Image (cartoon, grey):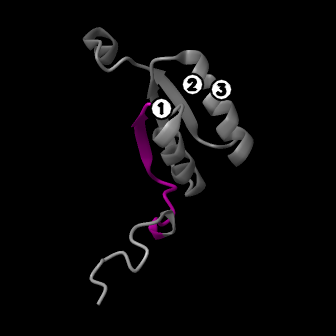
Amino acid sequence: MNTNQFGKKGWTPENLNDQSDKIYVITGANTGAGYEAAKILLDKNAEVIMLNRNENKSLKAIHSLKGIYGEQAKVSFIKMDLPNDTSVTR
């Protein structure tokens, strides 16, 4: 008997409803798991704000995401280096 509250496959992006009125802040969203999370959220109409150290990589990721979801995709970034307290405060 399956007792997983999300069904046989567990949680999948299909379980996420429309996120039009939501804003998500993701650290390290210009590559890897953060980038994939941004894709899932943008696909559900959310706004995504990336917190990344590298401006060039962030702009490249935004360009790529807007290429997938259109220029109207609500995706931006704030330059931030989490281990640097001054960067986080700014």
Left or right of 25? Residue 5 is left
Looking at the picture, how far across and down is residue 16, in whole percent? Answer: 46, 65
How many marks overall? 3
N-term mark: 1 or 2: 1
Q: Name the residue under label 3.
A: 60
Looking at the picture, how far across and down is residue 5, in whole percent? Answer: 30, 77
| Residue 33 falls within the magenta-colored stretch | no
- Of residue 42 and residue 30, the one placed in the foreground of this image is 30
> Residue sitting at 51 percent across and 51 percent down?
41
Start-end of magenta stretch: 15-28
Type of the residue with mark 2: Ser
Type of the residue with mark 1: Met
> Residue sitting at 40 percent across and 67 percent down?
11
**Which label number is shown at residue 3?**
none
Q: Name the residue under label 1.
A: 50
| Residue 19 falls within the magenta-colored stretch | yes
Mark 3 in CB contact with mark 2 (< 8 angstroms): yes
Question: Are there few (<14), some (14-19), or many (20+) residues within 10 Å of tag 1?
Answer: many
Q: Mark 2 points at which residue?
A: 58
Q: Quadrant of residue 23?
A: top left
Looking at the picture, how far across and down is residue 30, in whole percent? Answer: 53, 31
Question: With respect to residue 69, does 14 lie above or below?
Answer: below
Type of the residue with mark 3: Lys
N-term mark: 1 or 3: 1
Marks 1/2: CA–CA distance:
8 Å
Marks 3/2: CA–CA distance:
5 Å
Left or right of 19? Residue 88 is left
- Of residue 4 and residue 44, the one placed in the foreground of this image is 4
Q: In which quarter of the image is residue 85?
A: top left
The C terminus sits in image quarter: top left
